[in-house]
Image (tube, helix red, strand yellow):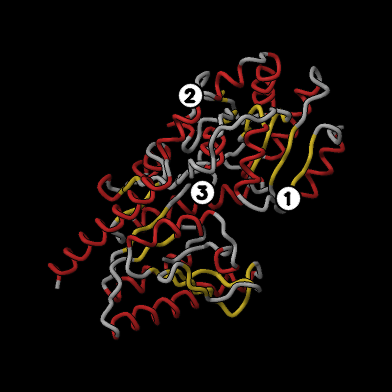
Amino acid sequence: MISGDIRAAQGAEGEFYEMLRKFHPFWERIDVVCPRTENSTPRTLFDRVHLHPVGRFAYPDLRAKLTQPRYTFIQAKQLIREGLREGRPYGLMTVHEVPPFHNSWAALRLARRYGLPVVSELHHVEGHPLAADLPSLLRRTATGLWVRYLSRRVEAIRTVNAKEVPEYLLARGVPRERIKVIYSFDIDLDQFSPASAERDLDFLFVGRLVPNKGPETFLRALALARRDHPELKAVIIGQGPLAGRLRDLALELDLEENLEFISWVKDRKELTGYYRRARALCVCSFSEGGPNVTLEAMACQTPCLGPPLGIHREVLVHGHNGLITGHRPETLAQAMARILDEPDLSPRLGKNGPATAAQFEAGAVIRTYAEGLQDVALSGKQRTGKRS
């Protein structure tokens, strides 16, 4: 795996760690090459997952980003050669696609040299359907160019939703047979589940505090909804470069008595507690592959207010398990007003959420992911054998 995840090598038990915990039994060995940070170290998880943080410089140093392809190439090449010497050749390489795709280019070059099948993982297209800022627009442009180059050089491009990203790829000339839809929303239904709890929070926002997630939209919508509901309560869980700016904006909008900022929660159990307390989760993103938080909240009988993007286009049904909004604060504020003005609306929408989330039960989703990759590895090996 060529991954952009940095948390697992730091010892954090986040989403990637949890995925590997359920994913590893399907494989004899998994090696993950990832960027190095100051506190990351090589680690072995579950006896067969080996994490290799690489780079001369540590993220987020710009020099680390610029030189990452070289060190990724060196480490991956070393692993492939070791596998061949020890009689355990690798069956597949997966590459997590992130603009500007310089890591991907290095990995593809190496895979071609050793005849290794590649699955490109495009979880979402930043800036699509909407760009939050100029960098997002540039990344969307780069992605459009890259997928045209990529489409005939990999065994498959994996997407994690069945509508938005496949439509994007088809419009850019990617052959339909190269597009493989494999969901990544592995929801632990034992953890994320309904429970009797007082709904003492009106609205919840969970996500990184970056422009694409739209946290400013959330604040401005709260300010509009507060005009008729001065006692409303909301929580933002997340951290990121916009944290200081958002706190200043909350003061400017006179929300200091209505809004609490929480930088991080210690584990999924604590996060579940916030889902269960909220009358609605608000998603304000401009582009997404998922998001996971929508399904986690639904599993806890908390409806979602959000735009029709990513997995929302498949699971968010207006008036059934949530309310569909636009990307402007005014449209989110209108949905908030309905939740506040109609006391029975949130529980009515919420009761339909667990059935939606159940489609993405972690064990079944990860099994499908593993089996999908194994199919690609087998077909790639067969084609390689025919060519030789």
Is 225 placed above or below 282 here? above
Q: Nearer the viewer, mark 3 or mark 2?
A: 2
- Specify the label residue 140 is tagged with: 3
Q: Are marks 3 and 2 in contact (CB under 8 Å)?
A: no
The location of residue 28, given as percent across then percent down, is 32, 69
Element marked by disc 3: helix
The location of residue 59, given as percent across then percent down, is 63, 69
Give the CA separation, mark 3 to mark 2: 27 Å
- Please tell me how many numbered marks the rendered image carries: 3
For residue 332, side relative to residue 168 (left or right): right
Q: Give, as a three-letter code, the residue at label 1.
A: Ser
- Specify the label residue 263 is tagged with: 1
Q: Give, as a three-letter code, the residue at label 2.
A: Val
Residue appearing at x 68%, y 50% in the figure: 265
Q: Nearer the viewer, mark 1 or mark 2?
A: 1
For residue 4, side relative to residue 160 (left or right): right
- Specify the label residue 317 is tagged with: 2
Residue appearing at x 67%, y 38% in the figure: 274
Q: Quadrant of residue 49?
A: bottom left
Q: Residues within 10 Å of mark 1 (few under 14, many from 20)?
A: some
The location of residue 130, given as percent across then percent down, is 55, 38
Q: Answer whether residue 94 is visible to the viewer in this image.
A: yes
Q: Give, as a three-letter code, the residue at label 3.
A: Arg
Is 356 placed above or below 179 here? above
Tag 2 or tag 1, which sits nearer the N-term? 1
